[in-house]
Structure formats: structure tokens, C-alpha cells
Amino acid sequence: MVVTVKVSKVTKTFRKGKTPVEVLKGVDLVIERGACMGILGPSGTGKTTLMRIIAGLEVPTSGDVYFDDKLVSTSNRIVVPPERRNIGMVFQSWALYPNMKAYDNIAFAVKNRKGEELRKKIEEIAEVLDIKKVLDRYPRELSGGQQQRVALARALAKDPSLLVLDEPFSNLDARIRDSARALVKKVQKEFGVTAIVVSHDPADIFSVADVAGVLLDGNFAQVGSPIELYDSPVSARVARLVGEINELDGQVEGGKLKVLNGTVEVKGLDEGEVKVGMRPEDLKVSEDQVPGMVSLGKVRVKVSSYTGSSFRLVVSPIEDDRVELYVNSDRPMDINSIALLYVRPEKVKIFRK
């Protein structure tokens, strides 16, 4: 049965020599039944530790973990062992047995089915994941994408209450990552299983998660939909982690934000110095006035490069060549040309220093 996962005030302390290191610091989290939760953060912030505590592979120093209303872990104690939590796991390495064919790798994880019932279940999942033709092959005979699908099939074949994916796309070639992300999202929704995806890459999380949490310094800095995290980050650090952003110094005075050589109307902000964030897609360089956008003054084009789907400009204010901003553009521009820099005012992000 699919579960709701609740984490309450969980801490985890490891010892580094004689020094205690607190990796998780009172984490609270609820993952609703059938939802996909993405946990995003740089290395060393506790993502994998939290995942292992939820899975029962690590004991919390304090705090509780519930599956529905059932306590499964508590302070320094595993209440329900991992093998009884009915969790399907997909590891970064995929962890396939090299001496077993794909079919047997999948079947090995299934304890509650035998014979014809097991065969039908595996073929049903293999059909969804498009791996029926490779079930009689060994892992070494499969591509990276096929190995990942076999690992996912193995996790799903046991009808898990919870599906956990740890950095599931990091070992895939860049050219197939998008299709792999789309497949995971499709399968998660089709099977209706509660899922956790752990990654350092925001593209992984945004592609598959209904709700995402940014884990920094042992706790969640922000939890929300991928759109909320990207458009309304609570700090410059979160904004930087979830996507590329230009950071500038600004000043709020009398309901106006002064940044570079422009002024943006703002409401409800205390006056003083602030950090301003602007994403490359929210900026535009033009010789002409741009409706709906605010001018930030004249800039000089330093770099104009083609990225395949658009052009990337690097520009600097004509008064200060040390400041560089990245701008997405639908056309190239001549190096050293001078134009106006515009921003979508509703997309400007303001953070306290």
C-alpha cells in the first residue's frame, strides 16, 4: 500500500574522530501519498543521510519517522527494519547483479510472487519501461539507459509503498537524461507510488518532482513546488542553487529599488541595501525600447555565443567593466556594441544582505 511519509524533528550526528558533526538539524518533512518529493542540495548537506534514515538504513540521533501513522524509526532505534518497509530503491550505480540476466535481476527483488504470476508482473513493467526485448541480456550487454530501466523495473516489481531514487540520472549521458527524467515521472504517476528523488542537479528535481526541498546546512531552507523555488527563492543561496542568476547590489528607497542605472517599483520592503537577483532569461539587450520591461541603463557587449537553441551574451555596464551579466538572447550581437539592458520588473528577486 502506498504511504504518506512524515519526518519529525530528525537530527543526525556523526563523529569525525573525537569531534561530533551534526549533519541533520531538526528536519521536518511530509510527503503526501502518491506524491513525488525532490530533495536538492550540494554535496555534504545531508541529502543521502536523510534518504537513508527514511529508508531505515540509518538510525536518527533524535526525532521520528512515520509511514502513515506507523512509527518506523525513532531516536537511536529502528522500529521497523528496512526489509519490512517495502521500499523500492534505485541507486546511483543501479547495483545490478552482473552474473544475472535482466529478467533475473528484476525477479530477485520480488518475494511475494512466483511462477506465472511473477512472469506476468515483470513483463507488464517491462512493457511500460520498454525493456521487454532486453530481459534475456546481462547488464554488460545493456546501455546505460537500459540498465537504469532494469533497476527501476526491479524497484517497481515488488509493488513498493515508497520508491526512493538516489542520484538516478548522474551516470547517464547528457543526451538521454531528458528522456530518462520524463520516463521516471511518467512511471511514478502511472503506478501512483509515493517517491523521493535525491539529486544535486535542479534539472533532475524540477523534471520529476511535485514538491521540492532545498537542503542546506542540515535543514530545509525552502520547500515548495519547483516553480515556487525557481521564481520565488527565499534567499540568494537558494536562488543560486536552483538556477543560474545574476547577482547585483541594490538600494531600496521610498518604494523604489535602485539597481545599476535603473529604478524598479517595489512594495512593502524596508529601506536599505539589498542583494538583487536577475535570471538570464528575464533580461534583454536592445537598441530600442522594450514594452513591459524596465531599462537598467547602457551596457557593452563583451561576448556573444551560440548555444544551439539561443544566444548567450555577456554584457557590462559602460561605467564599470568589472560587473558582468549573462543574458539569453534570440539573436547575436556585435562585440563592443552598446545597447540598453532591460529587465522584467516582476521577475526581479530581492534579498536582504
Image (tube, helix red, strand yellow):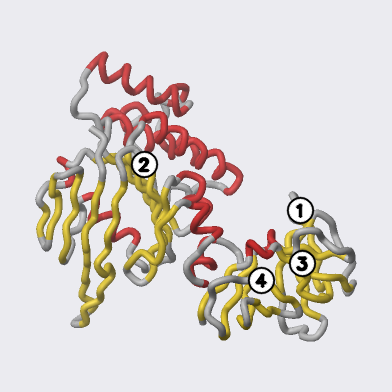
Circle 3: residue type: Tyr
CA gap, disc 3 to disc 2? 39 Å
Crowding around mark 2 (Cα neighbors within 10 Å: few <14, some 14 to 19, many 20+) is many
Q: Position of residue 233 (x, y in %)?
A: 50, 64
Residue under circle 4?
A: 265
Circle 2: residue type: Ala
Circle 4: residue type: Glu
Is residue 97 something one can see in this rendering?
A: no
Is residue 220 something one can see in this rendering?
A: yes
Secondary structure found at label 3: strand
Q: Earlier in the sequence, mark 3 or mark 1?
A: 1
Q: Quadrant of the N terminus?
A: top left
Circle 1: residue type: Ser
Q: Nearer the viewer, residue 351 or 49?
A: 351
Q: Residue at x 11, y 62 (%)?
A: 76
Quadrant position of residue 126: top left
The disc label shown at residue 310, or none: 1
Q: Residue at x 38, y 64 (%)?
A: 215
Q: Earlier in the sequence, mark 1 or mark 2?
A: 2
| Tag 2 and tag 4, C-beta contact below 8 Å | no
Q: Position of residue 66 (x, y in %)?
A: 18, 49
Foreground: disc 3 or disc 1? 3
